[in-house]
Amino acid sequence: MTRKGSALWNPYLAGVALGLVLFATFFATGHGLGVSGATTSLTAVGAAAVAPHLVGPGSYLAGYVRMGLNHWIEWEVLGVAIGAVAGALAARRFDPMIDGPTRLGPLARLILAAIGGTVTGFGARMAMGCTSGMGLSGGATLAAAGFLFLIGFFGGGLAAGFALKPLWRGGE
Amino acid sequence: MVGPLQLAGPVSGLILGFGFGFVLENAGFGDPKKLTAQLRLTDWSVFKVMFTAIIVCAVLLTIASGLGLVDMKRVFVPSVYFWGTLLGGVGLGVGMAVGGYCPGTCVVGLMSGRLDGLIFLLGVGAGTLIFNGAYPNIKFWAYAQTGPNAWTLPQLLHLPAWLVLLGLLAVLVGVGGLTAVSRGPGKREA
């Protein structure tokens, strides 16, 4: 399958670059890179604006509402967004589309994205972190939690990945 | 200058996040077909990038700590909440297999033009709200801590850090070697 834009980086070189950014993050801040902390804060603040009864005192998200949005991880995720669009534009890979399983139409793709995102959002709170915050950053401190997370991630992912192979295959 | 420097402001967040997003995009991780191909074992990039990054960063942290350049007591190391950590991981794996992303890569997908990345991100918000509702019923078992605070693999396995790092490197080299054989032209999904 042909793709637009420049070739991707070699995965080992991309891994070295990511490891250096991650180390710089630990050195600068004392913690690693994360994303779901920011999505959780955004959800909490958004819910407080439109449906405050969901995030009232004593609820899980109440503390996130109090913290607000002006903290490091929100700025970091904004940086991720800027870095990603810069990378996509520089490599001429920016391409408006509805991506997803090759055998499905646009609406079915968006429905699957919504379902997958919902499972992911629940899972990230369950684990108190996502692939970057728990798997990558936890793993880099050699935390047992990081590797336990990765066992669950690849175990659940492979089981579901093979079950859904008829939908996605042929896309690489 | 001994780290961590406790730079918690917008500038450090924007710069480090920029690097994170730029690398993820150039690794191809804004593409849900590439990400899910790892879960069908037809593309090993996710494993290679993550494991390489973990090893590079862990080696640098170990060296910097040994030289007294980083105070590891002030570096955040997550604790194990066995069922929460494990089942949460399963949720992220299943979520990626179904929807194509994780919370970070859906932002990268969105910023490279993919509407499904935005929908996945909104789904993450919905899942967070569902968790908020379910929290009173699951917090007792999901957030029950296993082991000491900030439990590490060297402590768990009673091995020195360098040996654990060598073991991780052996896994990366082994998997990398085994999966390099099947690459090249003509590769197809069976």
Image (cartoon, helix red, strand yellow):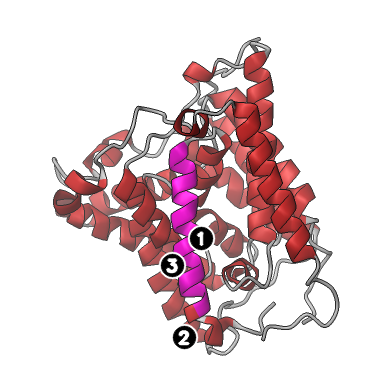
Q: Return the x and y of residue A38 as percentages of the image width and height.
A: 43, 45
Amino acid type at image mark 1: Phe
Question: For mark 3, does the 10 Å Cα neighbourhood hold few (<14), some (14 to 19), or many (20 or more) residues?
Answer: many
Q: Return the x and y of residue A85 as percentages of the image width and height.
A: 67, 56
Q: Nearer the viewer, mark 1 or mark 3?
A: 1
Question: For mark 2, does the 10 Å Cα neighbourhood hold few (<14), some (14 to 19), or many (20 or more) residues?
Answer: few
Q: Chain of mark 2?
A: A
**Is disc 3 in the same subunit as disc 2?**
no
- Name the disc covering residue A107, or none: 2
Seen at 62% across and 73% down, the residue is: B33
Relative horizontal placement of residue B36, taking residue A164 as reference (left or right): right
Q: Nearer the viewer, mark 2 or mark 1?
A: 1
- Name the disc covering residue B94, or none: 3
Q: Nearer the viewer, mark 3 or mark 2?
A: 3
Residue toward you, A124 or B188: B188
Q: Which residues are magenta?
A: A144-162
* Quarter of the C terminus of chain A within the rendering: bottom right
Residue toward you, B31 or B18: B31
**Measured Cα–Cα span from mark 3 to mark 2:** 20 Å
Residue A160 highlighted magenta (yes or no): yes
- Name the disc covering residue A154, or none: 1
**Measured Cα–Cα span from mark 1 to mark 3:** 9 Å
